[in-house]
Structures are given as structure tokens and as C-alpha cells.
Image (spheres, rainbow, N blue to C red):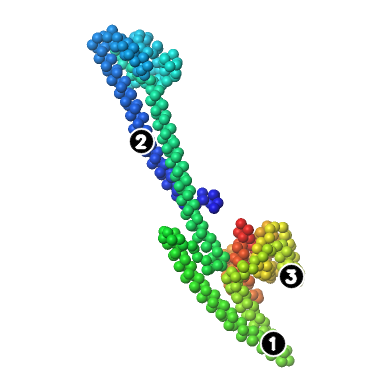
């Protein structure tokens, strides 16, 4: 299974959509978890600082500056490695007491809270740490700063963020893997349906979509499609059988009629009746050719000739067809140009391909005016036959492949409207794509065998 095909499947796109929705939900959940944990820790830190400030302010109100300095000194001495920060400064923010040797840089926010970095000389460990503090103005113009070293809190926050990021990444990877596996599973089922449809398009109406024992939606769809194909095959078989029976049943009496007309012609000596008998014999030949073409198209569409496919060099085949029709083209003063580039051989039925290319060249000679130009080309696995005749209108190019369909301008010319029908049947048998294009002026017919070699 090709990876680009997987990525362009609707199942994979649907899986990506669900992955995006699920990832968004996980992201919102992880964001709430972060807010609940890291945010809670920040709020707890602020509450601890606030309680510390209130306690020191009460001591200052009751015992004055000596009592406040004694309490701060006692707490710093009792817990020398504590993350609690103290700084008492005068009205000019000159440090008087505390474990900070200078007032932090920056303007204090109006809320009284200040976030700053503890520089090397400001911290006993010699590290640059984040800190958060609360400013409290005391009577007498003194300033009290109480805070905490939040380095550990920052590490915990980074750990939480890293954990949440890894959790989101793992969620996305698992969702992507799950979507890929699910898409591959569905794509295999869809591909089996496509393979069966392609075989049916190429003429094998007996093919059916495989059904598993899961009895899921795909099995139900496959069952309904198989029932529909059974009905179509039955109807097509009935139509084909009627057509074949008519062709078989009428070909024999037409052949007898043709033989009797020939016998009668030999017995008639007068010129007038002999000419009428010749015309009747020609009409009988035309009817026999029509029924022969119908039977041949039915045989081709059945796909039975595919078993005898061999390696064929298209260049040699086109040269043989052109050599056969060159005298007919010279009679009309037409010139056939060959442009046969080399290419890989294809697998096919040489007789059928010869007949198909012969029909295309015969049509080109028939509808190209006197002294016209016909081009037969090969480029890789693409064959083209182009002329400078009247061409075919764009709205009729699909219809000319139908049996017995003829343009109004061509009804006065000999033919039965089965030539291009046979060409289309041969193209389908060989998995080739046939197209009619404007040659400006004229018609250009291309037959591409790329799907067979792809």
C-alpha cells in the first residue's frame, strides 16, 4: 500500500480531525492541571509571604523598630539556609538589616508585590535565582521587604510543564499511530472494492467483492453491491445472449441467401438483372459483416481472449498496419507519416490490436480529403492516429463508441457504426485508455496503455 495514497484517504483525514479534537481536549485538561498545581503552589507562596509580613508588622506596632530587628535577626539565625528573604531599609531604601545586601532593582508595583532575580552577591549559594517579595511601608519612613527564593517552585513548574508537554506529545503520537492503523485497515477494504470494480470495468462481470465474517458496515455494503452486480450480470447476460442468438440465427440464413444470389447471378446472362443481383449480394455481405462484428465485440467484451496475451512490440505492429493501408491511402493521394519512438513491449492479443489500429487507420483514410495527411505515432505506451479531416464534434466523441452510432454527416458513407465500438472493446480488454481530441483541423485518436504497465 502506497504511503501517499494513505495520507490522501478520507479515513486518514477523518482520523487527523479526531486527533486534533482529542489533542485539544487533552491540552485543555493539562492546562487545567497546570493551573491547579503550579498555580496553587504560587498562591500558597504568596499567602505564606503575606502572613510573614503581617506578623512582622504587628511586632513593629507593639515593640517598635528594636523589637522588629530582634525578631528578624532571630529568624535568620534560627534558619540560616531558609528560602525566606528579609530586608529592612530606611526612607532612602538603604539596607539596615536582612539577608539581602541591597534593595532589588526595579520599581515596586502598585500592588506591593515584586518579582526579581537574586544576583550572585545577593544569595549565599552564588546562584542567580528567581525571587518573589512583598513590600510593606512602616511608620517612620522605613521599608520592609519580605519574600522567598522560589527557585524550587520554578523547578517544580518546569517539571510540570515538561511532563505535560511529553504527555501531549505522546497523546499526539499515539493518536497518529492509531489513525494510521485504522486508515490502513479501512483502506485495504476500500482497495479490495476498487480492485473488484476495475476488473468488472475491464469486462469480468463475474468478479465479486470479498465479504468477511465480521458482519460490519463494509460487509453489508459489499453484500448489497454483490447483489446489485448479480442483477447487472444477469441483465447483461440476457442482452448479450439475445444479441448473440440473433447474430447466430441470422448469419446462417444470410449466408445461404448470399450463396443462392451468387448461384443465381451465374445463371443470369442479362446485364440488368446481374447488376441487381450484385447489389443484393453486396447488401448481404454488409449484413454478414455486421453480425460478424457484433459476435466479435461480444467475444472481446467477455474477456476470454485475455488468457492468450503475449508480449507485443507496438512499433512492429503499427508498421504492419500502415504497410497494409498505404496502397489505399495512395489511391486518394494521401500521405501517411510515421513517428514511432521506441518503448517497452506490452502484453496483449496481436490480432485484436491489429484489428483496432486497422479500424482507426481505415477511418482516417475514409474521412480525410484528397491529398490529406495522416500521422501515426508512438510515444512510449501511447499510440496516436491523427488526420486533417472534418473531425468529430466534442459533444459526440463519447457517443461514437456506442454500437451502431453514426454521425448525421456520415450516414451516406458505407459502414455499420461498429468500427469504433470494436476499438473501444479492444482498449478495455487491454486496460488502455482511449481518447478523441481535436487535431485542429481533424481528429486525433490516442490509446494509452500506461495503466497496464503501471
User: Which mark is nearer the camera, 3 or 2?
Assistant: 2
Going 59% across and 79% down the picture, which residue do you hit?
A: 247
**N-terminal-most mark, 3 or 1:** 1
Pointer 1 residue? 262
Q: Residue furthest top?
A: 66
Q: Which residue is mark 2?
A: 32
Label 3 secondary element: helix
Which residue is the site of mark 3? 324
Q: Is residue 260 above or below residue 295?
A: below
Q: Residues within 10 Å of mark 2 (few under 14, many from 20)?
A: few
Which percent across, then down, holds residue 202? 57, 65
Within 10 Å of disc 3 (Cα), the crowding (few <14, some 14-19, many 20+) is few
Q: 306 or 88: nearer the eye?
A: 306
Residue 16: percent from the left, percent from the top? 45, 46
Relative to 268, is 314 above or below?
above
Q: Quadrant of residue 430?
A: bottom right
Query: Residue 311: where, in percent of width, then height?
Result: 68, 63
Left or right side of 384 for 401:
left
Circle 1 crowding by C-alpha within 10 Å: few under 14, some 14–19, many from 20? some
Amino acid at each position: 500500500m502506497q504511503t501517499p495514497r494513505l495520507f490522501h484517504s478520507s479515513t486518514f483525514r477523518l482520523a487527523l480531525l479526531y486527533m486534533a479534537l482529542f489533542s485539544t481536549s487533552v491540552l485543555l485538561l493539562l492546562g487545567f492541571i497546570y493551573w491547579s498545581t503550579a498555580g496553587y503552589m504560587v498562591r500558597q507562596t504568596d499567602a505564606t509571604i503575606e502572613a510573614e509580613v503581617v506578623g512582622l508588622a504587628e511586632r513593629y506596632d507593639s515593640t517598635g523598630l528594636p523589637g522588629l530587628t530582634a525578631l528578624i535577626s532571630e529568624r535568620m539565625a534560627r534558619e540560616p539556609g531558609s528560602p525566606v528573604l528579609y530586608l529592612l531599609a530606611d526612607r532612602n531604601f538603604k539596607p539596615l538589616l536582612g539577608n539581602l545586601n541591597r534593595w532589588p532593582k526595579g520599581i515596586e508595583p502598585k500592588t506591593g508585590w515584586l518579582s526579581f532575580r537574586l544576583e550572585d552577591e545577593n544569595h549565599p549559594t552564588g546562584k542567580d535565582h528567581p525571587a518573589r517579595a512583598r513590600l510593606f511601608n512602616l511608620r517612620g519612613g522605613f521599608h520592609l521587604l519580605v519574600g522567598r527564593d522560589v527557585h524550587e517552585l520554578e523547578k517544580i513548574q518546569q517539571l510540570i510543564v515538561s511532563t505535560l508537554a511529553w504527555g501531549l506529545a505522546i497523546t499526539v503520537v499515539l493518536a497518529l499511530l492509531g489513525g494510521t492503523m485504522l486508515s490502513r485497515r479501512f483502506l485495504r477494504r476500500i482497495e479490495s472494492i476498487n480492485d473488484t470494480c476495475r476488473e468488472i470495468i475491464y469486462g469480468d462481470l463475474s468478479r465479486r467483492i470479498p465479504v468477511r465474517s465480521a458482519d460490519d458496515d463494509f460487509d453489508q455494503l459489499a453484500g448489497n453491491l454483490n447483489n446489485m452486480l448479480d442483477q447487472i450480470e444477469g441483465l447483461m447476460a440476457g442482452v448479450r445472449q439475445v444479441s448473440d442468438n440473433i447474430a447466430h440465427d441470422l448469419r446462417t440464413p444470410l449466408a445461404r441467401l448470399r450463396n443462392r444470389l451468387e448461384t443465381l447471378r451465374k445463371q443470369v446472362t442479362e446485364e440488368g438483372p446481374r447488376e441487381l443481383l450484385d447489389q443484393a449480394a453486396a447488401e448481404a455481405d454488409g449484413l454478414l459483416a455486421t453480425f460478424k462484428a457484433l459476435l466479435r465485440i461480444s467475444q472481446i467484451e467477455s474477456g476470454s481472449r485475455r488468457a492468450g496475451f503475449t508480449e507485443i512490440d507496438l512499433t512492429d505492429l503499427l508498421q504492419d498496419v500502415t504497410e497494409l493501408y498505404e496502397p489505399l491511402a495512395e489511391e486518394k493521394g494521401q500521405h501517411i507519416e510515421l513517428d514511432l519512438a521506441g518503448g517497452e513491449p506490452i502484453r496483449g492479443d496481436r490480432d485484436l490490436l491489429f484489428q483496432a489500429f486497422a479500424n482507426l487507420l481505415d477511418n482516417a483514410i475514409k474521412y480525410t480529403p484528397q491529398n490529406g495527411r495522416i500521422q501515426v505515432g508512438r510515444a512510449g505506451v501511447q499510440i496516436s492516429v491523427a488526420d486533417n479531416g472534418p473531425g468529430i464534434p466534442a459533444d459526440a466523441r463519447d457517443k461514437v463508441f456506442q454500437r451502431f452510432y453514426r454521425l448525421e454527416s456520415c450516414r451516406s458513407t458505407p459502414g455499420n457504426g461498429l468500427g469504433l465500438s470494436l476499438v473501444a472493446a479492444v482498449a478495455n480488454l487491454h486496460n488502455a485508455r482511449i481518447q478523441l481530441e481535436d487535431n485542429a483541423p481533424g481528429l486525433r485518436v490516442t490509446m494509452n496503455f500506461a495503466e497496464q504497465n503501471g
